[in-house]
Image (cartoon, grey):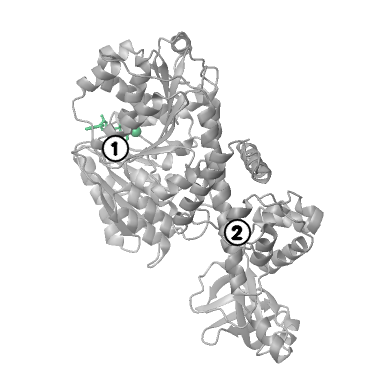
Amino acid sequence: MLLPPTLLDRVLGDKTAKSFAKNLGLVTVSDLLQHYPRRYSNRGELTPIANLPIGESLSIVAEVVDARERRTKGRVSSILEVRITDGSGFLSLTFFNQAWRQKDLRPGVRGLFAGKIGEYQGKLQLAHPDYELFPEELSQFDAKAWADQPIPIYPASANVTTWMIQKALGIVLDTLESIPDEVPEGLQKEHKLLSVNQALEKIHRPTTKAEINAAKKTLVYREAFLLQSTLIQRRIDNEQAPATARLSKASGFLTRFDASLPFKLTAGQKEVGREITADLAKTYPMNRLLQGEVGSGKTLVALRGMLTIADSDGQSVLLAPTEVLASQHFRSIQKSLGEDLAKEVGLTLLTGQLPTDERKKAMLQVVSGKARIVIGTHALFSEKVEFYDLGLVVIDEQHRFGVEQREKLRLKGKLSPHVLTMTATPIPRTLAVTVFGDMAVSSLTELPAGRKEIDSHVVRAGDKSLVARVWGRVAEEIAKGHQAFVVCPKIDESEKEQSGASVEKTVSSLRQNSALKGLRIQELHGRMDAEQKAQIMQAFSSKEIDLLVSTTVIEVGVDVPNATVMVILDADNFGISQLHQLRGRVGRGSAKGLCLLLTAAEDGSIALERIEAVAGESDGFKLSEIDLELRREGDVLGASQSGGRSSLRLLRVIQDANLIKKVREEVEQIFARDRGLDSSPTLKAALEQINSAENLAKG
Ligand code: ADP
Ligand code: MG
């Protein structure tokens, strides 16, 4: 929406604006207007006290029961203890040296109380809460309307309370100019939408529930509309860029490669292979996302695409997020191609670790076009590497690359290269259309035959004997000649923000664990330099290390088939897809994998539910759906999954799937009629604003 980009200090004053920016990340009037209420309370309805979550900041409507002043021992200070109730449960408020509040906080008075819920001597309490009491004297008629009027409750912080936000919004809304509408009139009418101004007014200052619903409906529609417009515009722009059509030769590299395969392609691999072949034959660049579990055979599919390009005398590059992964890809592709084919296509590894002269030689091969298949890291690639005729870029692990890097890649070829992005973090189809709507999406849903499932179990921290048994199991696997991973949420104790076990502490405690006596235990984490990390991974691969204790640096793609067991400590610190990714590191060889998820998460918590979901489900696509359902609130399209795309505020991808589909069709029609959006200037301006904001965010 084209909301005013005015800085908040103009409207709220310096001090308030600074505090809004620091505590809530709200900088402009536009940010504030889109800081929507989390929920609504009303004065007549008390908030149930029984289930208030300890440790969370929240606002509740309650009634004062009584207030008592106590003197502390030395009699120098006093504590005012006020009990409030929802009619059944009680909560105490405590104030130090503020006895004067007693005259306001009289029995029977109602108000809105805000603070962090704590527990003291077994009782729920709010220490030094902020509150706003409701006036008691109102006429009978007013009282009812007033009691029913929704009070917006905003996501707030300890320093910026919900009513400070409400007040600030009041100021902004009172002077808000008329906002132009990017949704065409016909669609506004069809969907019975409010105007932008009305919707903002009613979401922030509703007088009835019906108004809230109408405002929400309007705002959700607009989010879907703008998101789909952005995605479809990108897709259309992409289709305008010229690319070279590529076809494989009758008895070329691809044919020879297929004939040499020791196994049959899965049905999915064949299907996706056909999709890619069709894309490569077009005269505008492919922009395809290939999603599938670790081990589902994505690299093989990509390699077949690269061979098609080689058949048309063009070049391909496969980019991996790290040097370790680039080398690993190189070795496995070398093996798949076989000696002759690898030589003929000029398979070349290009990473920062290569000695200078080798690197120069590799670069020369690339510039001259002799290297038709190049494997490298993104970091190196963004430097001065020139291609003779770059036809295809394959990007491994989407979530490690931003959209901006893809743009840079485009500039590498004479014409735009085709782009295939591979991700092992599958996302449900509904979401794929939503976030990757500018890409074509292919999915490999089956694993090649013969792959074994990983045994996964949740181990509750409270069960000491079971925890001890974990290390016994690890020792047994190692005794059989296998290796083990232990994953921790943080590196050392200096990371105060991050909870859970540290690599540092875990290594020293495991070294003292009698079950693991004499084993070679090594640590690995992201603060080590690339060379050191590579050395350690190399040592692990060549079985010089039995047990690797690390952070999530091993998350992506590392392939050590001899590692059969993974222990994840304080697993509640990781997301569902991350746990699934991590677990994919074991059981890659002939022996069955075992994953033990340790957690101190409480019964009935969402954290425990997440971990149990991972333990109980091995299908990454299903897990990603569960993940979405469990993340009821918050930013569904976290930057990591959306590749930095605009975050959604009210739109929920699963819940609103039908709406999204409908809106997508509507937007397609708009662009079909008027590709340049010449007759929709407001929409055009809104999209320009979104694109420039994203470019800014990308730096
Ligand atoms: P991904 O990149 O999706 O993790 P890979 O392409 O690396 O998966 O494949 C994993 C392993 O499975 C490789 O060793 C590969 O050679 C093998 N593989 C791939 N496709 C098949 C298939 N159709 N049948 C049997 N093995 C396969
Ligand atoms: Mg792979």
Q: Nearer the viewer, residue 225 or 62?
A: 225
Residue 598 position (above or below residue 313): below
Q: What residue sits right under mark 2 in the picture?
A: 189
Query: For this view, does 470 lie left or right of residue 166?
Result: left
Query: For this view, does 174 lie left or right of residue 594?
Result: right
Mark 1–mark 2 distance (CA, rounded to whole Å): 47 Å
The x, y position of residue 158, in whole percent, is: 65, 64
Query: For this view, does 653 lie left or right of residue 201?
Result: left
Q: Is residue 524 visible?
A: no
Nearer the observer, disc 1 or disc 2?
2
Taking the spot 52% from the left edge, 84% from the top edge, the residue there is 89
Q: Is mark 1 within 8 Å of ligand 1?
A: yes
Q: Is mark 2 within 8 Å of ligand 1?
A: no
The x, y position of residue 469, in whole percent, is: 25, 55
Q: Is residue 306 visible?
A: yes
Quarter of the image where ligand 1 sits: top left
The x, y position of residue 455, in whole percent, is: 24, 50
What's the residue type where badge 1 is placed?
Answer: Ser
- The reply to whether the C-beta atoms of the residues labelled 1 and 2 are less than 8 Å apart is no
Q: Quadrant of residue 104?
A: bottom right
Residue 630 position (above or below residue 549): below
Q: What residue sits right under mark 1 in the picture?
A: 296
